[in-house]
Image: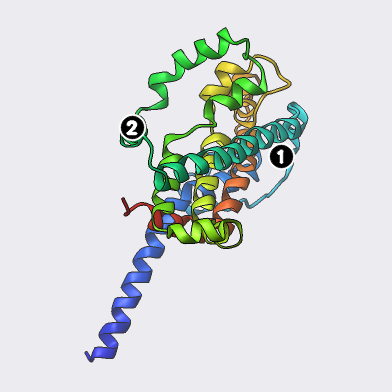
Amino acid sequence: MGLKEKDILKRVLFYGGNAIVALIFVSPLLWMIAASLKPEAQIFSDMSNIRTFWPAAATLGNYVEVFTRVNMMKFILNSLFYVFVIVILDLAVNSVCGYALAKFNFPGKELLLTVVISLMVLPMEAIMLPLYKEVASLGWVNTWAGLIVPFVGKCFSIYMFRQFFLDIPDDLLEAAFFTIVMPISGTVYATIFILDFVAHWNDFMWPMLVVTGEDMRTIQLAIQTFFGSKPIHYGAIMASLTISAIPMLLMFVFLQKYYVEGIASTGIKG
């Protein structure tokens, strides 16, 4: 076998292996979409063969049920509002904090940076109940402030921005921040945007604690109603989960380039 044939074989094995791994990881998503288009009786009837990934008798009845059983459009809009306000405030507030830690010298800077890095490893579950008590004491239960304000400041976002701004020359920052620095900072902004959007779009526990009325219910809380109220139709559950996955899929399709570049440009500096 010549050198050219070996090179072709390596490429075939490499891309073939990647394709197999990709199919394994994406198969649950494909099954969910297929199940959302199947009649209820067919969802689990063909689990033992390849037909489980193909809706032979496709129907939109499950999606119709989702929008008729609950006010799904309102819950989607609630989630979009909740997520986008958090993301915008995160980008605005934490980029300034990261810039200060990267470019300004002030007393206690190193201590503050140490605290930021230390708090990054603190799980949300460890502070959720104290945070809820604080929100309740402020009278923010079942309010947008209670949903949004606790998540404006994020240590991870501050650290990401700080790492990115470290590599930008000070003269460039002072001379042309908005015309040069902001455009070239798109990767880190896109990275934070994606991470924030996915985290809060999928968030269930915090909205469940804070939201007590139906008017502010998010899409994840709406999906839970299909599990807790009868009749339990798995087709409707799969349809609601598919609807919930669409914004995240679109986000990664259009912003994955910036996400990869942002992680690469901020994760190895410091």
Q: Amino acid at mark 2?
A: Val
Q: Position of residue 111 (x, y in %)?
A: 31, 32
Considering every residue shown, the one lying at the far left of the view is 1
How many badges with numbers are in the image? 2
The label on residue 92 is none
From the top left corner, tell me how far across and down residue 114 is, in percent: 31, 34
Instruction: Please report the residue visible at 54 percent of the width from the left and 60 percent of the height from the top.
Output: 175
**CA gap, disc 2 and disc 1:** 40 Å
Question: In the image, residue 266 lies at what x, y percent?
Answer: 39, 53
Query: Which residue is at a point 41% across and 19% down the rendered structure image?
Result: 127
Left or right: where 101 falls relative to 90: left
Q: Nearer the viewer, residue 104 or 253?
A: 104
Q: Residue furthest top?
A: 137
Packing grade of label 2 (10 A; few <14, some 14-19, many >=20) is few
Which amino acid, by three-letter code, is at mark 1? Tyr
**Which residue is label 1 attached to?**
63
Q: Is residue 256 in sight in this rendering?
A: no
- Judge whether residue 56 can be spotted in this image: yes
Residue at the location (59% across, 58% down)? 254
Q: Is residue 258 above or below residue 215?
A: below
Residue 1 pos. (x, y %): 21, 89
Q: Nearer the viewer, residue 256 or 93?
A: 93
- The secondary structure type at the circle numbered 2 is loop
Horizontal side, residue 148 vs residue 68: left or right = left
Residue 121 marker: 2
Please identify, in this view, whether the residue under mark 2 or under mark 1 is nearer the observer: 2
Q: Is residue 139 above or below residue 78?
A: above
**Callout 1 environment at 10 Å: few (<14), some (14 to 19), or many (20+)?**
some
